[in-house]
């Protein structure tokens, strides 16, 4: 039986924390659907199309991960609807710190209420990546800092190109 997991997020941009979670999930699941959320209530640095391109380059060009096991899609629906579309009953979420837990716990509960066949599992990135957040990465780039320890080469290029356009 093919086990498919849905890994939703904004990935604005993708970081080594996200990538850690994906790599760990590759050991547990047959297929990972990386769902790049495009709900309109967020203030994104990158458009949905740009984020999908960034995630694809990071995973497949920079890291050479398997396209057979990972698919990257955009979605602007409920995560539970994305699960239905890909015939999955598992949502994957990453945890960095205790501060993430309350929000993630509530989100998992709401998804369970929307569809009681869906389970949410949590994976933690490795210790050295638990402090990384997309928000901090964007801020460091904006202030001219070095983000090599936080994300891939192609993502850094996309961030710098975007930042140069705003200067």
Image: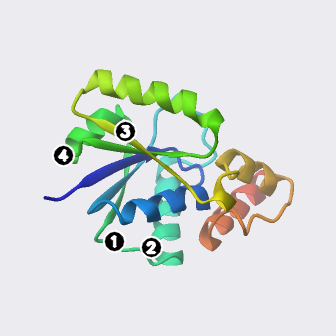
Q: Residue under label 1, please give it.
A: 67
Q: Residue under label 2, please give it.
A: 60
**Alpha-carbon neighbours of circle 4 within 10 Å: few (<14), some, or many (≥20)?**
some
SS at circle 1: loop
Q: Quadrant of the N terminus?
A: bottom left
Q: Residue under label 3, please give it.
A: 120
Which residue corresponds to the image point at 22% horizontal and 55% vertical from the top-left? 3
SS at circle 2: helix
* Measured Cα–Cα span from mark 3 to mark 4: 15 Å
Which residue corresponds to the image point at 47% horizontal and 24% vertical from the top-left? 106
Q: Residue under label 4, please give it.
A: 87
| First along the sequence among labels 4 and 2 | 2
* Measured Cα–Cα span from mark 2 to mark 3: 26 Å
Give the total of numbered labels.
4
SS at circle 4: loop
| First along the sequence among labels 2 and 3 | 2
| First along the sequence among labels 1 and 4 | 1
Name the side, left or right, on which 7 lies relative to 62: left
**Alpha-carbon neighbours of circle 2 within 10 Å: few (<14), some, or many (≥20)?**
some
């Amino acid at each position: 039986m093919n086990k498919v997991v849905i890994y939703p997020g904004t990935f604005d941009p993708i970081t080594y924390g996200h990538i850690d979670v994906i790599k760990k999930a590759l050991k547990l699941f047959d297929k990972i659907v990386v769902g790049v959320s495009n709900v309109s209530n967020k203030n994104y640095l990158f458009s949905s199309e740009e984020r999908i391109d960034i995630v694809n380059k990071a995973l497949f060009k920079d890291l050479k991960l398997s396209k057979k096991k990972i698919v990257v899609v955009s979605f602007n629906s409920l995560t539970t609807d994305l699960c239905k579309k890909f015939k999955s009953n598992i949502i994957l979420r990453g945890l960095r710190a205790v501060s993430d837990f309350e929000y993630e716990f509530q989100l998992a509960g709401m998804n369970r209420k929307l569809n009681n066949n869906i389970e949410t599992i949590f994976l933690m990135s490795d210790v050295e990546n638990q402090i990384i957040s997309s928000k901090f990465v964007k801020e460091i780039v904006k202030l001219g800092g070095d983000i090599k320890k936080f994300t891939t080469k192609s993502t850094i290029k996309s961030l710098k190109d975007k930042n140069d356009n705003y200067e």
